[in-house]
């Protein structure tokens, strides 16, 4: 097989890239390790920046998002028995859209298959090669037979545990990492959300988040020890803990019900640089991870592939390599700011230090500052809704 861009991974980064390239007349083939059902069922992110929505519109995959997505013009920050709403629209003129990553993935896969364009699910042992001699290819096994995809470029969109980043010689890659001493225990349930907007709560017992997927489906998280076993948290124990941390006002109107999904995710910050090795380009979680507090992971995957698609289009249209040469620098400039925001909001909202410590007072003082200062609230809001591409 031969194509122009070989894409590893059918997550949001790989799928969106394939559509952005197709719009520009560039061919690609996606190789995905897992089955379509598995990819479409993974419960992950839920908050989209306007820039991400615009990219989904550009590729013609936003019809259901506009019909079913929930526009959020603000979010509430709860701390020390207080609640403060940050009004994104008023402070920045922008809003975010709550629409599950699972739904985006389904929409992007359905559109690609409807266009008759290739996604090879259950591609085993995908191995990038030819990177040193400038003749990139991907070796893999599909439906029992060994295959080889020759391409001009490889896009590594295979997430944090993929093979792309590992194909770059370690001496040429620098990585930066922060592992947090806690995780998030998440629950998904078919009950109406406790509030029409998200609530981020800082509490002595630990962080809690009230989110949603639709007017009838709620998503909640609590800060937990990283080695927490979800089976130690029967539904009732988790609902009780959420009520404590989100406060009496939320507890009074919180609807509870059986969990559809319950899982623990570790929190980590990670960046690998550069995001390029010869004709291999990394995008999304393959290159960087953010803790979910800022809701940035999926949005960064989208901005990366926006830059990459533009750079590949400049190459194919005009034979210009300059944009490919600055892809890593351009993408990382935005990545680092989202890393900073996610790290900062994580530190502000989680229980990290003993009760009564100096650091706890610093968290509370900063939250009080955000509640009282338009400048401080604007700094939070403009990062949350997404910095410009
Ligand atoms: P993805 O979504 O991980 O997709 C990568 C795809 O590559 C496939 N793959 C391979 N394919 C072929 N050969 C190989 N060797 C392969 N290795 C892997 C995988 O099967 C997969 O289909 O990365 P992408 O596209 O960069 O998208 C990034 C986002 O998914 C990610 O940033 C967010 O979901 C992060 N994230 C969250 N972000 C939020 O903003 N809010 C959240 O609540 C939130 N929850 C989460 C998350 C990420 C999680 N991960 C990665 C474990 C919860 C979890 C559990
Ligand atoms: C979610 O709904 O899954 C979600 C929302 C906001 C976050 C993280 C996760 O910051």
Image: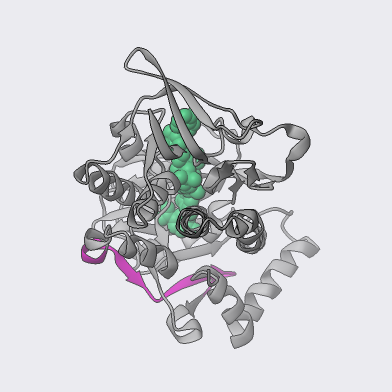
The residue sitting at the front extreme is 319
Q: Is residue 86 above or below residue 113?
A: below
Q: Position of residue 117 (x, y in %)?
A: 27, 41
Residue 278 figure quarter: top right
> Principal SS element in the magenta part?
strand
Residue 384 on the magenta span:
no
Residue 277 figure quarter: top right
Q: Position of residue 231 (x, y in %)?
A: 44, 30
Q: Is residue 338 above or below residue 151?
A: below
Nearer to me, 296 or 10: 10
Q: Position of residue 115 (x, y in %)?
A: 22, 46
Let me know if residue 233 appears in the view: no
Q: Left or right: where does residue 230 sit relative to residue 121?
A: right
Nearer to me, 215 or 151: 151
The stretch of residues the image draws in magenta is 66-83
Q: Residue at x 49, y 41 (%)?
A: 157
Residue 67 on the magenta span:
yes
Nearer to me, 216 or 122: 122
Quadrant position of ligand 2:
bottom left
Q: Is residue 190 above or below residue 6?
A: below
Q: Position of residue 290 (x, y in %)?
A: 59, 51
Nearer to me, 237 or 340: 340
**Where does the N terminus fall, quadrant-wise?**
top left
Q: Left or right: where does residue 272 sit relative to residue 265?
A: right
Q: Is residue 34 above or below residue 63?
A: above
Let me know if residue 122 appears in the view: yes
Q: Residue at x 27, y 45 (%)?
A: 112
């Amino acid at each position: 097989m031969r194509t122009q861009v070989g894409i590893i991974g059918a997550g949001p980064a790989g799928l969106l890239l394939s559509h952005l390239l197709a719009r520009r007349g560039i061919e690609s083939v996606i190789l995905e390790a897992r089955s379509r059902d598995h990819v479409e069922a993974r419960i992950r992110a839920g908050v989209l920046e306007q820039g991400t929505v615009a990219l989904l519109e550009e590729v013609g995959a936003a019809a259901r998002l506009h019909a079913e997505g929930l526009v959020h013009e603000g979010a509430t920050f709860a701390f020390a028995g207080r609640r403060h709403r940050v009004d994104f629209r008023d402070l920045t003129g922008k809003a975010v859209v709550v629409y599950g990553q699972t739904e985006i993935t389904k929409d992007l896969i359905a559109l690609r298959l409807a266009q008759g364009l290739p996604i090879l699910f259950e591609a085993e042992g995908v191995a990038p090669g030819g990177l040193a001699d400038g003749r990139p290819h991907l070796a893999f096994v599909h439906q029992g037979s060994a295959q080889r995809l020759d391409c001009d470029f490889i896009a590594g969109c295979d997430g944090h545990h993929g093979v792309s980043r590992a194909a770059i010689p370690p001496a040429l890659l620098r990585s930066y990492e922060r592992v947090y001493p806690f995780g998030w225990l998440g629950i998904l349930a078919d009950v109406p959300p406790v509030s029409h907007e998200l609530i981020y709560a800082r509490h002595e017992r630990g962080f809690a988040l009230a989110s949603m997927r639709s007017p009838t489906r709620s998503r909640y998280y609590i800060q937990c020890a990283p080695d927490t076993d979800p089976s130690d948290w029967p539904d009732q124990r988790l609902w009780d803990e959420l009520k404590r941390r989100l406060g009496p006002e939320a507890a009074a109107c919180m609807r509870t019900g059986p969990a559809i999904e319950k899982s623990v995710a570790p929190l980590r910050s990670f960046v690998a640089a550069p995001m390029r090795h010869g004709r291999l380009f990394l995008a999304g979680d393959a290159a960087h991870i953010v803790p979910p507090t800022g809701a940035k992971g999926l949005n960064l995957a989208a901005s990366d592939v926006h830059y990459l698609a533009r750079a590949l289009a400049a190459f194919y249209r005009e034979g210009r390599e300059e944009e490919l040469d600055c892809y890593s620098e351009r993408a990382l400039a935005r990545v680092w700011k989202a890393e900073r925001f996610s790290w900062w909001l994580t530190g502000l909202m989680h229980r990290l230090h003993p009760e009564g410590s100096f650091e706890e007072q610093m968290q509370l003082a900063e939250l009080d500052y955000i509640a009282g200062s338009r400048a401080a609230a604007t700094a939070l809001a403009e990062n949350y809704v997404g910095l410009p591409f």
